[in-house]
Each structure stands twice: as C-alpha cells, then as structure tokens.
Amino acid sequence: MSKKINLEINVPKNWSAVTLRKYLELIKDMEVYKDTPEAIDAALFHHLCGVQPNYLSKLDISIYTDIKEKLYKLMAVDDLPLKNKVLIDGVEFGFEPNLGEMEYGAYLDLQVFKEVRIDENWCKIMNILYRKVTNKIGGLYEIETYSAKDNSEKFLDVTMDVHFGAMFFFLHTYLDLLKDTQNSLKKELLVSLPNMKSILQKSGLGIPLFTN
C-alpha cells in the first residue's frame, strides 16, 4: 500500500506571482520539450506551482485537470497594461516617459536587440527603459538620465505582469506603425512581416501553439 502524501500546491492566479527569472526557466524547458505535451505540462506544474514531476502521477485526476486548465489559461494571455512605475528593492523605477525624446545613447543600445521578445536579453531592454524616478508631479514623473549603468540583474526578480505590460506596449506600438504605413509597402513585403501570434510564440506565450 502506497504512503499518502500531503502536497500543498499554490497555483498562480495571474502573472504578478511569477518572476522573470522563473519564467525564463519555464520557457527554456518548454522549448526543449516542445514536441512532448506531457513534458510541457510537467514543466508548467514544476516552474509555476513548484510540483516535482514525480508527484504528478499521484494527483487526483480532477485536481490535475483543474490546475492544468488554470495554467493553460494563464499562458494564453494576449494583453496586459503597461506599468509606468515599479518598485525594485524599495526604489521606484519609471518607464521612459517620452520615447520620442529618449536619449540617443539609450536608443542606440536598444537597437542592438533585433527582436521584441522575452528571452535572456529582455532584462537588458528593461534596464534601458526603466530608470530611477527623480521627480514626481501629480501623475507625471521624471527619470534619471540614461548612463548605460547595468541594473539588468534587478529585473530578473520583477514579476511578469510588469514585463508583459512593457512587451505588449511595444508590440501594439509596432503593429500600429505597420498598419499606418502599410499603404506604402509592397504586397510582397507585407506577407513576410511578423504578426502578433508569431511574436507571442517566440516569447513562450500561447501555450496551445505547442500542443496542437
């Protein structure tokens, strides 16, 4: 007779419960096991709920199915709002308040990254876009001048609601620009342009894409 195990499972209700560090570990495993749905499920349970793979078979089927549905729903998120300010180690950081007047050095450093996707370089992008708040007046704020100081490690422990908010902001801005300029583009070029679905897939979102 097998010994009964009491297992407490904390299922994240939203992305504010998951850090970038944990998320990068998840999508790394998802890519490795993208052709094995059972392994993807195990990765989701392990990284998002802290359940070791060897315990999955011991879960009641109704509990397993309920948690799996919640995790899939979480992974299928397709939009989150931009968070203009975020606290990191007790210090307030603000998103670049005027992209049109961004310092040239910050612009050049952003150009190094060829894709808008959440991967191992994403925290470096966030380090450029979010800088310490130096002044606030009502809902307005100013941030410190860009100095290329590397605070990127700090963003690994920032939760994914902040990261997704920034990513979706850029995706919507990017797609709006494409929409505004498409009349001047050749039809052949439009066919090859990336869309929201492909970008989300590269960032690990849209989990059904891996299992269909």
Image (cartoon, grey):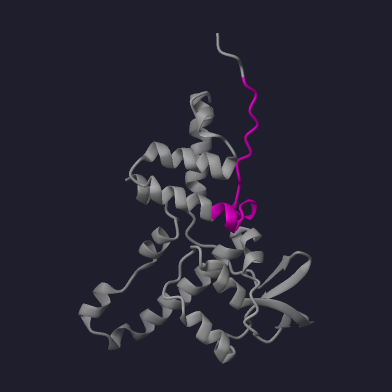
Position of 148 compared to 209: left or right? right
Question: Is residue 97 within the magenta segment?
Answer: no
- At which x and y percent is residue 210? 36, 48
Res 199 quadrant in image? bottom left
Who is closer to the viewer here, 167 or 33?
A: 33
Which residue does the image show at 60% across and 77% down from the upper left? 129
- At which x and y percent is residue 158? 65, 61
Who is closer to the viewer here, 112 or 209?
A: 112
**Could you tell me what secondary structure mostly forms the magenta stretch?**
loop
Which residue does the image show at 49% across and 63% down from the upper left? 118
Res 155 quadrant in image? bottom right
What span is colored magenta in the figure?
5-23
Q: Is residue 139 visible?
A: no
Question: Is residue 8 within the magenta segment?
Answer: yes
Is residue 115 shown above or below 22?
below
Which residue does the image show at 60% across and 51% down from the upper left? 14
Position of 108 compared to 152: left or right? left
User: From the image, which quarter does the N terminus lie in?
Assistant: top right
Q: Is residue 99 visible?
A: yes
Taking the view exactly as shown, the residue that stands out farthest to the top is: 1
Is residue 100 shown above or below 187?
below
Q: How many marks?
A: 0
Position of 94 compared to 57: left or right? right
Who is closer to the viewer here, 127 or 12?
A: 127
Is residue 180 shown above or below 82?
below
Which residue does the image show at 21% across and 80% down from the upper left? 187
User: From the image, which quarter does the C terminus lie in?
Assistant: top left
Is residue 67 shown above or below 169?
above
Taking the view exactly as shown, the residue that stands out farthest to the left is: 188
